[in-house]
Image (cartoon, rainbow, N blue to C red):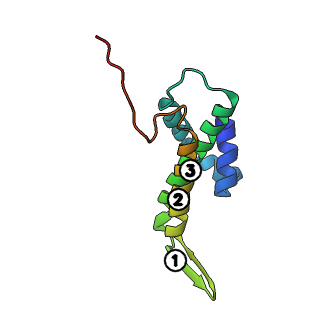
Amino acid sequence: MLKNVLKRFSVISGLTGEELSKWSFLCTECLNYVLEHTIREELSDSQQERCACLAASIAYYKLALYDSDKVSSFTAGDIHISQEQSVLRAEKMMNCEMEQCRDFTDFGGPCFMGVTI
C-alpha cells in the first residue's frame, strides 16, 4: 500500500526522484496514521485504494505546511500565486479524502463506543 501512497503523493505534489525520496518518510508516517484509525480488521481493494489516497493527501497537506515558510506570495501581471492558497487547497483535498473514508475510519463524524457490562 505504501507504493500506492508514494505514487499518489508524487502526482499531487509534483515531486519525483530524489525529492520524492526525501519526503517518503512523511508518506510512511501518514499511512501508519491512517491505518491506526481504521475501524475494520480487513479492507477491501477499494478501501485500500481510498486509504492510500487519504494518506497521500495528509502527507501533501503536511508538506504544504512545512513549505509555507518559503515565499508566501508572488504576483506577475495578472497572475497571483499564494502559499496560503496552496495550504488551503491541500486542506480541502485532505478533508475530501477523509469524507470518502468515513465508512472504514474514525475520522470525522460521531464515534460511538460500546460498553460491556
Q: Position of residue 109 (x, y in %)?
A: 43, 40
Quadrant housing the C terminus? top left
Q: Is residue 10 left or right of residue 68?
A: right
Q: What residue do we see at 40% from left, 37% from top?
A: 110
Assess disc 1: are there few (<14), some (14-19) or many (≥20) residues with their C-alpha within 10 Å of its C-alpha. few
Residue identifier under label 1: 73
Identity of the residue drawn at 46% across and 34% down = 106
Q: Nearer the viewer, residue 83 or 98?
A: 98
Along the line of sight, the residue nearer the viewer: 100 or 60? 100
Say which of marks 3 and 2 sits in front: 3
Secondary element under disc 1, as helix, strand or loop, is strand
* Quarter location, residue 19: bottom right
116 sits left or right of 16 in the view:
left
- Which mark sits nearer the N-terminus, 1 or 2? 2
Observer-nearest residue: 26 or 112?
A: 112
**Marked residue nearer the N-terminal end (3 or 2):** 2
Residue 11 x %, y %: 70, 53
Identify the residue under disc 3: 96
Q: Is residue 3 above or below residue 42?
A: below
| 111 to the left or right of 14 | left
- Residue type at tag 3: Cys
**CB contact under 8 Å: marks 3 and 2:** no
Task: Report if residue 63 is visible in the image.
Answer: no
Which SS class for mark 3? Answer: helix
Q: CA distance from mark 3 to mark 1?
A: 25 Å
| Between 4 and 110, the one nearer to me in the picture | 110
- Whichever of labels 3 and 1 marks the residue nearer the N terminus, that label is 1
Q: Check disc 1 and give the amino acid type.
A: Ser
Which residue in the protein does label 2 denote? 64
Q: Is residue 79 above or below residue 11?
A: below
Residue found at x 36% / y 25% = 113
